[in-house]
Amino acid sequence: MIYIIRNQHEYGPYEAPDIARYVEEGRLLLNDRARDAESGVEGTVEELLAVRGIRPRVRNRGSLMEQLRYIGHAFIFPKDDMERHHIMEDKRLLILAIVGLSLSIIMLLPIGGYLVFYAVSLYFATVWGLFFAYFFRTRQISKSKAVSTFFLTQLGVFVIFSGLNELNFFYAFTSAPFPLSILGYILGIGLTEEFAKMIPLLVLERRAREPQLPQTMVFYGLMAGIAFGVFEGVQYQTSINIRADYTTAFVLNIARLTSLPFLHAVWAGICGYFVGMAGLYPQYRKSLYVLALAIPATLHGLYDLFAGNFYLVSLVIAFLSVFLLMAYLRRSNALRERLRG
C-alpha cells in the first residue's frame, strides 16, 4: 500500500497496481511524492513502484494532430487575449517587453556617435527605474514625476557641469597629497555632484500638492541618481573609456552603465530620505538639509578617493552606502517619532 502526498496532504493508501493505472491515465505523475504505508519510506511514485517491479508508461491520448485539435486554436493562438486592451492591462508583460526589447528597437534608429552612448545609457536607466519602482514604490509615486525628475536632473547637471562646477575651488585639492586630497574629493567632487542631484528633489518637494513620504522621496532620489549616472557614463564613454584598450574599455563601459549609476542612485536616495524628512518636519529643516547633502557627499568623495589605488576600500564604502540607505528606511518611523516629539 502506498500513500500519495500532494500539497502536504496524504491521500490513500492505494494498491500499487491502482497507482500504476492512475499514472498511465495521467491522473497521477511519476514524480508525485509518495510514502510506503508499511515501511514509512518516502520517495517519488516512480521510485516506490520500481521497488515493486512496476514501471508504468503514460498513455498518449490520440495522435499528435488529435492532441493539437483537442487543445484547440484558441489556446495555441489566443487572439482575443492578445488584443491591445488586454496587453495594456498586463503590467508584467509591459515591463518584460520594455526590458527585453527596448535596446533592439534602439538599434534600428539612425543614430551614431554621442547619441548611441546616450541611447544605450537610457536603456539601462529605464531598467533601473523599473527595478526601483518595484522595490521602493509608494502610493504617491507618479510616473510623470519620475520621468520629469530624471530629465530635470540631467538638465541641471548639464548646466552645472558646463562650467559652473569649476567655481568650486576645492576641486584643486584632488591633486594634493593624502590626506589633504580628502577635501578635494568630498568638498569638491562629492559636494558638487550630490548638490546637482539634490536640486530637483528640493523642487519636487516644494511643489508637491501633499506632504511627501520619505520613502517617496527616496524613490525620486534614486531616479535623480540614475540620471546623473547616465550623464557621467556617457561622458566617460566618449572620452576616457574610448582611449583605453578593448578589454578595459569594455569593462569600464559596462560598469558605467550598470554598477556606477546604481551607486549614484543610492547616494541620491539617501539625500531624498532626508529631504523628505525636512518636508514633513520643517522646524528641523536646517539640520536635515545638511545631512541630505553631507552624508552622500562624504560617501561619494571617499569612494572616489580610494577607487584608483585601494578599490577594496571603495567597495566597502559602496556596501556601506547601500546598508545605510536600507537602515534609514527601516528606522524611518522611529525618526519621525523623534522629530514629532
Image: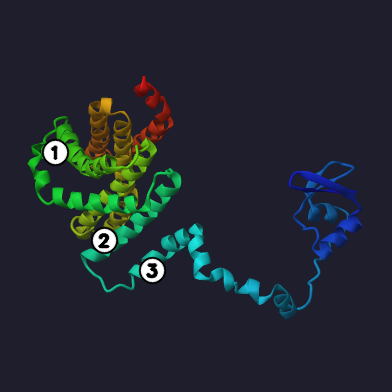
Question: What's the amino acid at mark 3?
Answer: Ser
Circle 3 packing at 10 Å, graded few (<14), some (14-19), many (20+), is: few
Query: Which residue, given by chain and number where applicable, does mark 1 sit on?
Result: 174
One can see residue 232 in this view:
no
Give the mark, 2 or 1, whose residue is nearer the N terminus. 2
Give the mark, 3 or 1, whose residue is nearer the N terminus. 3
Residue at the front extreme, as displayed: 209
Question: What's the amino acid at mark 2?
Answer: Tyr
Q: In the rendered structure, are the residues bearing label 2 and label 1 in contact, judged by CB atoms less than 8 Å apart?
A: no
Side of 25 where 250 appears, left or right: left
- x then y, percent, for residue 72: 68, 75
Q: Secondary structure at mark 2?
A: helix
145 is higher (above) or lower (below) than 274 = below
Residue depth check, mark 2 versus mark 1: number of the one nearer the observer: 2
- x then y, percent, for residue 264: 29, 44
Query: Which residue, given by chain and number where applicable, does mark 2 sit on?
Result: 118
Q: Nearer the viewer, residue 323 or 249?
A: 323
Q: Nearer the viewer, residue 147 or 26?
A: 147
Query: Which residue, given by chain and number where applicable, does mark 3 sit on?
Result: 104
**Residue under the image location 29 percent in, 63 percent down:** 119
Q: Which mark is residue 257?
A: none
Tell me which corner region of the image, top left, top right, bottom left or bottom right, holds residue 68.
bottom right
